[in-house]
Amino acid sequence: MRKLLGLVLALALPGCSLVTLDLTPRIRPLEEQTVEGAGRAKILLVDVSGFLSDEGPSPGLLGPAPPRVPMLARLREELKKAADDPEVRALVLRINSPGGTVTASDIIWRELDGWKRVTRRPVVAVMLDVAASGGYYAALAADTIVAHPTSVTGSIGVIMVTLNAEGLLQKLGLATATIKSGERKDMGNPFRALTDEERRIFQSVIDSLHGQFVARLVEGRRLAPETARAIADGRIYTAQQALELKLVDRIGYMPDAIEAARRAAGVDEARVIVYHRPREYRATYYARSQAAGAPLDAQMAQLAAVLGGGPRFLYLWWP
């Protein structure tokens, strides 16, 4: 399309030779930017916010969305760049997320945990508005978790939502026909109700994924299994409640998290840095990465897409 535009322009201008213009936007390499501090040592700020998913931006009304690296790819790219820089002495994970898909949440945890084990550098998580469900799952990879005084966390558990449009089709006088190889092949079909057996099958998957979350909680927060299971009933917690339950290590602000990372790294002074691409605004440690998940006003559209694509398992606080 963009090359065609170049051809049209060339033909429309008299006396001009034929040229082909490639106007496709390019994704440029990450650049380093200091947002505060001084010294050779660096503390990298990594953003995990919005709906956690491995999907890229959805097309807009006027065509494809601008090129943007999906969240998981961006996270791995940032961690690789930081691992290759010996001056990056610690990582601060800024979380503002109600969670997302089970797989995306687990990949984020694994990437952070792997980076920490390979580099032997500390990771400090700081929660902003919300670090619930998958957002809290990601925080479990950190050595220290700092909750903002007004943070909401918890919602430890799994949810799966599926639509049942059977009644709507009946009102419209429509019917569907499904040809399948096995009795359970269309489990979660939005055009019919779940059977009792199908509910039991889905519940067994939910229980397994919930058990994985609880295991991460036991390991990451050094809790007794029975204590972790009691906490992980899906409810949300305030920062103070989370502190009392040992879900977080302290209540504080972003500067407190940065100071905790500096001390854990064992350096007297350090620059707080972010990685960004050209034209991304990242001048302060509150500036959000463009590779973060969908903002709150776009989450319902993403969730609609999730439902439209059939049942999906989510580590998500979805009131």
Image (tube, rainbow, N blue to C red):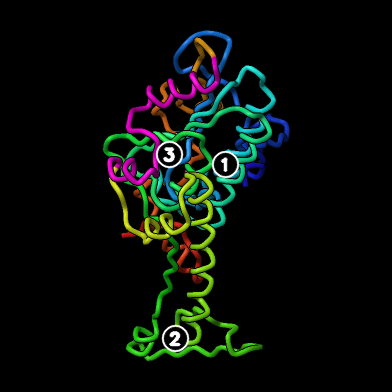
- Are circles 2 and 1 on residues that touch, CB within 8 Å? no
Residue 72 lies, in percent from the top left, at 58, 45
Instruction: Report the Cα–Cα distance between label 1 and label 3.
Output: 23 Å
- Reading the image, the residue beneath label 3 is 95
Q: Say which label, 3 or 2, has the lower sequence index.
A: 3
Residue at the (32%, 88%) spot, across then down: 171
What is the magenta segment's predominant secondary structure? helix
Magenta stretch: give its range.
Answer: 239-266
Name the residue rendered at 62%, 88% in the picture: 180
Which residue is label 1 attached to?
67
Element type at mark 3: strand
**Membership of 259 in magenta stretch:** yes
Residue extending farthest to the right is 18
The residue nearer to you, when weighing 206 against 17, is 206
Q: Position of residue 6 (x, y in %)?
A: 64, 38
The mark closer to the camera, 1 or 3, is: 3
Q: Amino acid at mark 2?
A: Arg
Q: Position of residue 195 (x, y in %)?
A: 46, 88
Q: Amino acid at mark 1?
A: Pro
Q: CA distance from mark 2 to mark 1?
A: 38 Å
What crowding class fits label 2: few (fewer than 14 Cα within 10 Å), some (14-19), or many (20 or more)?
Answer: some
Q: Which residue is mark 2?
A: 192
Question: What quarter of the picture does the C terminus occupy?
Answer: bottom left
- Tell me the quarter of the picture where residue 11 sits: top right
- Using residue 102 as the reference point, say whether residue 182 is left or right of it: right
